[in-house]
Image (cartoon, rainbow, N blue to C red):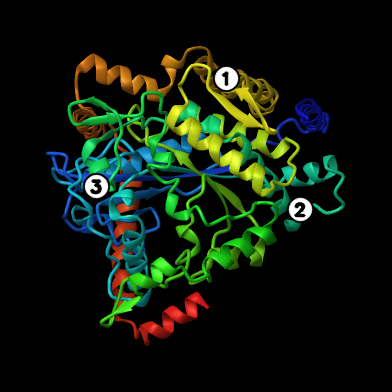
Amino acid sequence: MASRIDRVFERRLASLVNAGEPTLLQGGRRGVEKESLRVTPAGRIATTPHPAALGSALTNDHITTDYSEALIELVTPTFRTNWELLQYLCDLHQFVYRHLGDELLWATSMPCVVDGDASIPIAQFGPSNVGRMKTIYREGLGLRYGRVMQAISGVHFNYSFPERLWEAWASIRESRDAGQDFVSSSYFELLRNYRRHGWIVLYLFGVSPTVCKSFLRARGETLPEFGRGTAWEPYATSLRMSDLGYRNRSQSGVDVSVNSLADYVRDLTRAISTPHPEYERLGVKVDGVYRQLNANLLQIENEYYAFIRPKRVARSGERPTKALLRAGVEYVEVRALDVSAFDPVGVNQNKMRFLEAFLAFCLMRDSALIDAGEQAALDGNHVMVARHGREPGLQLVRDGRKVPMLDWAREILDQMQGVCELLDHGDPQKPYAAALAVQAAKLDDVALTPSSRLIHELRDTGESFFDLALRTSAAHKAYFLDLHAPNPARLGEFAAQAEESLQAAEAMAQAPQGDFDAFLADYLA
């Protein structure tokens, strides 16, 4: 089976090369969403409100909050080059740090010292109906999964292929139609192959092999002791993406197919409309106060935790599934990246170049439909690499048989070489080939993986995970505050956006709201 799939991939790649347009893969749009906990100088989660100088979390498109009032989320626009994207993200960090006072942005995905759920303040979005709904949704998440899990942060990489690719791709695929249905179908082929091969992202980029013991206590979990205040899984790459983090056991009954857009929307719709007995027991509106939006398997679509999601920019008040049904898949959101303590902005160009090439690889591979048996094996592979990815001789399940993980990984990277050549066309620096070489080195020497680097640093310094993360957070803050020649125009732009967002939020709060129960029922209908 593997050789047949390989031949299909090679034939498609050759057809793309021979299309006479070697730059067809270049210039896709990419953006980043990066989450970071605000913490005190002592490393405790900040209990202060979202800084007003950063604008309103409800209406600022680029600086908002995620689950917690202390969990800042920085959202870039989309760019056609990685350097522009990273420059914007760097400028955002400079602006934010100028308005944090003595607080820091925590440098790792796994949180600092947590004193149970009560120590994590839920994000507040004001008195408008939209704002109330966003806060109640988070109350529900806290009830269902615990607030501590929601304090984990990550980096999301959003990507869409260049529009001009699709006509050539439709010709290669012998499709008469290169319209939106074909584009959506192609993205779902990518999603299936990401489910098959995405474990490699955890091996190459996972950087959460250790946790603060306070996190485990709050979750009622145990792991082997690493040192003072620190626990670990000895060969872990990304505990964030394991069953200790976002691969939440509570969602084990939520099966969402990526065999087609129709199947995906059907399964998500079923999950957000099927009552869950345990959540019914918690109550929805108790003594006149909402505890969650509803008592269904999922309150809304965003509650479904996935490594990658198909996305379409929604209109105001439009649900994600409705946006997908209205206009099809616009881009994909890769959600498997840990915040990198080794990069001040949490991500770097090599990582983004690899992901771009990897997504093209997933698009171009043959992509059979996934049945329930295969999906269970694929889920198992991801959890195995998250918790044991650096284990010597580790084997994963492929096509019903066990195969050495490193052999499979080398096969993926070998096939990606041709993709990188297309992405590098016309650039003598060959940055994509260079990014691929950096990852290939991690297959030959596990010590080069970020998770291994973190373990070595903890051993070399004798620090606890908490001490290392706090020291790194302080170093990152100093880096951004000491950067020379900030972009004054960009910083002014951020300040203006913050002020406009405060005015917009105030206008929403002052506008006639109508009955909240009716508003919520209308949204959920």
Q: What residue type is labelled 2?
A: Phe
Label 2: how many Cα within 10 Å (few below 14, some 14–19, many 20+): many
Q: What residue type is labelled 3?
A: Ala
Q: Quick check: 317 above or below 311?
A: below
Which residue: 46% across, 81% down? 521
User: Which secondary structure lies at badge 1?
Assistant: helix
Mark 1 or 2, which is nearer the eye? 1
Mark 2 — residue? 182
Which residue: 41% across, 33% down? 238
Q: What residue type is labelled 1?
A: Leu
Which badge, 1 or 2, is on the more N-terminal residue? 2
Mark 3 — residue? 218
Mark 1 — residue? 406
Of 64 and 193, which appears nearest the observer? 193
Residue 510, numbered label? none
Q: Is residue 381 in view?
A: yes
User: Which secondary structure lies at badge 2?
Assistant: helix
Residue 69 on image: x %, y % = 26, 57
User: Which secondary structure lies at badge 3?
Assistant: helix
Residue 380 on image: x %, y % = 54, 38
